[in-house]
Image (cartoon, grey):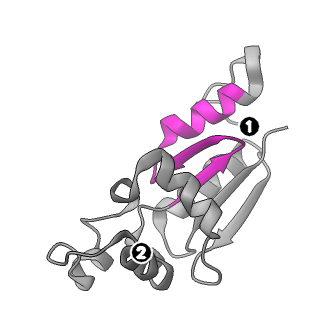
Amino acid sequence: MLSVQIFGVRNSPATRAAERFFKERRVPIHFSDLKQKPMSPGEIKRFIDRFGLAGLLDSEGKAAIDAGLKYLKLSDAELLARIEKNPGLLRLPLVRAANQLSVGHDEDSWKAMLADASGSFGISGSFRT
C-alpha cells in the first residue's frame, strides 16, 4: 500500500492541500514539520538531485523576498543553511512516495503517485468517497 511523506509547515496552504488530497484518498501520511525538525541531509539531497536547489526555492515567496535572496550570491552550502533556519524559503510541500518526488502544490504529480501505486486499477484524481 502506498504511503507518503510530506515535508512542510502547518501554516502553509499548499502543505494543508497535500495533506487533504492524500487523506481524502485514504493514503497513510507521515508529516514532517520543518519548523520543528529540518530535513535530513540525505532527504534534502534526494530532492536537490531531482529538481536542483533552484527548483526547490520559492524565489517569489515572501520569505525569499524578505531574506533578499534575489540580490545575494550564496553558495549552495550557505543557501542550505538558510533553508534549514527558514523552511519558508522552499516551495512547499515536498512530497515523497517511494521513489517519486514532488515539489509545491502539484496535484498532477500526486495523482501520478496514486496511479503508479495502483498499477492497472487506474485510480482517478476525481474519485471521492
Query: Where is residue 56 shown, x and y percent of the image?
Result: 41, 58
- Residue at 44% in and 74% down: 80
Stretch of the chain drawn in magenta: 93-116
Image check: 17 left or right of 3?
Answer: left
Classify 10 Å Cα crowding around label 1: few (below 14), some (14-19), many (20 and above).
Answer: few
Considering every residue shown, the one lying at the far left of the view is: 71
What amino acid type is highlighted by mark number 1?
A: Thr
What amino acid type is highlighted by mark number 2?
A: Ala
Looking at the rendered structure, the secondary structure element under dot 2 is helix
Query: Where is residue 34 shown, x and y percent of the image?
Result: 58, 76
Report which residue position mark 1 lands on. 129
Report which residue position mark 2 lands on. 77
Q: Is residue 67 above or below residue 116?
A: below
- Marks 2 and 1 sit apart, C-alpha to C-alpha, by 45 Å
Quadrant position of the C terminus in the picture: top right
Q: How many marks?
A: 2
Quadrant hosting residue 104 = bottom left
Considering every residue shown, the one lying at the far top of the view is: 120
The tag earlier along the polypeptide, 2 or 1, is: 2
Looking at the rendered structure, the secondary structure element under dot 1 is loop
In this rendering, does residue 103 appear at all? no
Quadrant position of the N terminus in the picture: top right
Query: Where is residue 128 shown, x and y percent of the image?
Result: 67, 35
Image check: 48 left or right of 65?
Answer: right
- Residue at 44% in and 76% down: 83
In this rendering, does residue 119 appear at all? yes
Q: Is residue 86 above or below residue 51?
A: below
